[in-house]
């Protein structure tokens, strides 16, 4: 079983729509959670950390459900510029800083 | 925000040659850097953890004699792909952990390696 699993999509949505997707992780002792964004042929860029109480950053909302071991990302009022692959990233252990990446969820926002 | 650079951004080489990739943290000191590899449509796979002043820690299945890592200063880590073969063609990305304690990492722009 993979340490981090994501629905690869693609999610194809019109501008202004809301899109949401989840990611599951296998290690219940995982410590830190992040969403990264990766554009085609580019490096990942940190979108937001995910906190236990859930958090928002503008149009982006992240949630963590430790009991079910999943995190989610919701994008409101989608923009064309939101088209990208969103990577779910988990720090599995507290004694190192190694990150495990999901394969990514592709979102395409169309005009 | 923190900036990490990589050089070169892409390289094409013949099979059997060695390729050196540099990763630099430009505005902070990084005691720990990470090297990843990403094949098309796949997730980033951690290859090794590079620690300043000590030996790198390699992930299972990554040959340390094939992928030489040197982290000689707090702002520079290098990855050398020795005797590269076509199956080593990939997108190599480094990242650095910021000393401010955040768990997130800052990624370099990546190096595309094509071995002919």
Image (cartoon, rainbow, N blue to C red):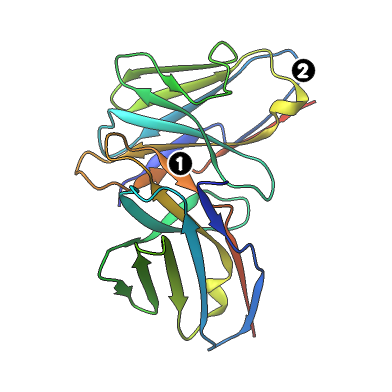
Question: Residue A108 lies in what quarter of the image?
Answer: bottom right
Tell me the element at label 2. Answer: loop
Packing grade of label 1 (10 A; few <14, some 14-19, many >=20) is many
- Residue at image point 29% right, 46% down: B103
Residue A61 location, x and y as percent? Answer: 37, 75
* Quarter containing the C terminus of chain A: bottom right
Question: Residue B82 lies in what quarter of the image?
Answer: top right
Q: Chain of mark 2?
A: B
Q: Residue furthest front?
A: A67
Residue A57 location, x and y as percent? Answer: 32, 73
Residue A78 location, x and y as percent? Answer: 51, 82
Q: Residue furthest bottom?
A: A16
- Residue at image point 39% right, 75% down: A60
Q: Are marks 2 and 1 on the same chain?
A: yes
Between B56 and A22, the one nearer to me in the picture: A22
- A62 versus B103 height, above or below: below
Between B112 and B100, the one nearer to me in the picture: B100
- B1 versus B92 height, above or below: below
Packing grade of label 2 (10 A; few <14, some 14-19, many >=20) is some
Q: Is residue A58 left or right of residue B29?
A: right
Tell me the element at label 1. Answer: loop
Between B64 and B68, the one nearer to me in the picture: B64
Q: Chain of mark 1?
A: B
Give me the C-alpha separation between circle 2 and circle 1: 25 Å
- The residue pinned by badge 2 equals B15
Question: Of the residues under marks 2 and 1, which one precedes in the sequence?
Answer: 2
- The residue pinned by badge 1 equals B108
Residue B22 location, x and y as percent? Answer: 47, 26
């Amino acid at each position: 079983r993979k340490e981090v699993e994501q629905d690869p999509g693609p999610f194809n949505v019109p501008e202004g729509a809301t899109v949401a997707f989840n990611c599951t992780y296998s290690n219940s002792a995982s410590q830190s959670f992040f969403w990264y964004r990766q554009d085609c042929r580019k490096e990942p860029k940190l979108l937001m950390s995910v906190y236990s109480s859930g958090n928002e950053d503008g149009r982006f909302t992240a949630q963590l459900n430790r009991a079910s071991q999943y995190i989610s990302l919701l994008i409101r009022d989608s923009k064309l510029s939101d088209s990208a692959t969103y990577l779910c990233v988990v720090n599995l252990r507290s004694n190192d800083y190694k990150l495990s990446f999901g394969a990514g969820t592709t979102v395409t926002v169309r005009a | 925000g923190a900036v990490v650079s990589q050089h070169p951004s892409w390289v094409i080489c013949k099979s059997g040659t060695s390729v050196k990739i540099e990763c630099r943290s430009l505005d902070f000191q990084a005691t720990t850097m990470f090297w990843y590899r990403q094949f098309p449509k796949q997730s980033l796979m951690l290859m090794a953890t590079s620690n300043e002043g000590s030996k790198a820690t390699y992930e299972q299945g990554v040959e340390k004699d094939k992928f030489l890592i040197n982290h000689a200063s707090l702002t520079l880590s290098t990855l050398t792909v020795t005797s590269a073969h076509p199956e080593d063609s990939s997108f190599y990305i480094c990242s650095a952990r910021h000393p401010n304690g955040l768990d997130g990492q800052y990624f370099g722009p990546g190096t595309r390696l094509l071995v002919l």
